[in-house]
Amino acid sequence: MLINRLRRGFSLSEVLICLGVVSIAFLGTFASLICSQRAVGVGQRMSIATGYCRQICEIVRARGLAYSSGTVPASGSDLQTAEGVTNTPLNQGAAFSALPNDGKYTRSINTVRVANNGFGFNLYRVTVAVYWKEGKRLNKVSMVTLARVPLT
């Protein structure tokens, strides 16, 4: 009579199946880590661009730049970027020299008088956009602020 012996160890097919399952799990984990690292990088760049937008808005408001000439700034000036221009350096112009010369980010500023007469005549809408490239894609963060001519 044959005695049913206890098997010791694993067969080759069991080891190969185990390796396949473990490798698929590692690949999935690795892929999710890469995606999360890319998302963190995008978030950091967006946070930096938002900070630059806020700084530019505060400079415009604090110094009264939107209305210093009494009229809407001319196109191509530091406060009126021409339509479609997205490559103006952050620190272009004397008023913005405090901003860093960060070559990764550019800006555009557009100033519009809210109304042609009445109270809105003293109010300017300033739109600030900060751009940066990621690969071939141009990203943008924009903010709108209002600047009012002081009533004296």
Image (cartoon, rainbow, N blue to C red):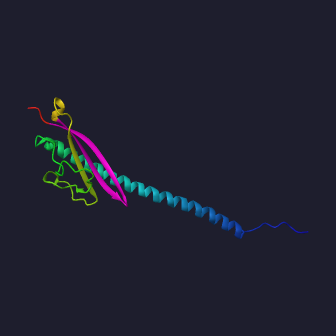
User: What residue do we see at 55% from left, 62% from top?
Assistant: 26
Q: Above or below — where is 135 with respect to 118?
A: below
Residue 78 % position (x, y)? 17, 51
Please name the predominant secondary structure of the magenta segment in the image: strand
* 134 and 62: which is toward the camera: 134
Q: What quarter of the picture does the N terminus occupy?
A: bottom right
The percent position of residue 102, horizontal first and vertical second, equals 24, 59
Give the image location of residue 118, x and y in percent.
16, 29
Residue 98 versus residue 114 in the image, above or below: below
Task: Tell me: residue 48, above or below residue 3.
Answer: above
Query: In the orientation shown, which residue stands out farthest toward the bottom?
Result: 12
| Of 149 and 21, the residue lying toward us | 149
Tally of marks:
0
Per the image, is 12 magenta? Answer: no
Q: Quadrant of residue 20?
A: bottom right
Residue 89 sits in which quadrant? bottom left
Q: Position of residue 129 (x, y in %)?
A: 27, 49
Say which residue appears at 16% left-offset and 31% top-offset.
Answer: 117
Which quarter of the image is occupied by the C terminus?
A: top left
Numbered range of the magenta stretch: 123-148
Q: What residue lies at 28% left-to-right and 59% top-to-bottom?
A: 104
